[in-house]
Image (spheres, rainbow, N blue to C red):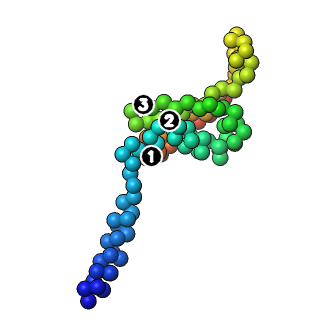
Amino acid sequence: MKTLLSAFSCLLFCPALLSQGVKPSSGFVPDAATAVKVAEAVLIPIYGAKAIQSERPFTATLEGDIWTVNGTLPCPDAKTDKRVSCKGGVATVKMSKTDAHIIFMWHGK
C-alpha cells in the first residue's frame, strides 16, 4: 500500500517539479555573441538568409536587461572612399537578456 501511495504521489507531484526548468543566473542571452545568434535566427526566416548575411558583422550592445543587435550597412565603396555615402538600412532586434523574448524587430530601408 505504501508503494502504491508513493507511486501515486510521484505521478501527481513529479511533473510539477520537473516543469520548473532551468533559469540561468546570467540569463538566456548572457553575452553579445549569443545575442547576435538569436537575432540572426529570428531575422533570416523573415528577410532571407542572403539579405541578413550581407549585413554581417552584427553588433550587440546591452543596456540594462535589453540587448540591441544591429546589422552593418553593406557598402563596399565606402571602405575605399570615405566620401561615399551609402543608402539603405539594416536590421535591428531588441531582446531580453533574461528570457530571450523579442521585444522589437525591424529593418530600415
Is residue 78 depicted above or below 19 in this figure?
A: above
Residue 26 appears left or right of 47: left
- Work out whether residue 87 can be spotted: yes
Give the alpha-carbon distance from disc 1 to disc 3, as whole Å. 16 Å
| Residue occupied by mark 2 | 32
Where does label 1 land, which residue? Answer: 28
Q: Amino acid at mark 1?
A: Phe
The residues tagged by marks 1 and 2 sit, at their Cα atoms, a distance apart of 12 Å
Q: Is residue 88 left or right of residue 28?
A: right
Label count reads: 3
Q: Nearer the N terminus, badge 1 or badge 3? A: 1
Circle 1 sits in a helix, a strand or a loop, which is it?
loop
Vertical placement of residue 101 versus 10, above or below: above
Which residue position holds label 3?
63
What crowding class fits label 2: few (fewer than 14 Cα within 10 Å), some (14-19), or many (20 or more)? Answer: some
Foreground residue among 26 and 51: 26
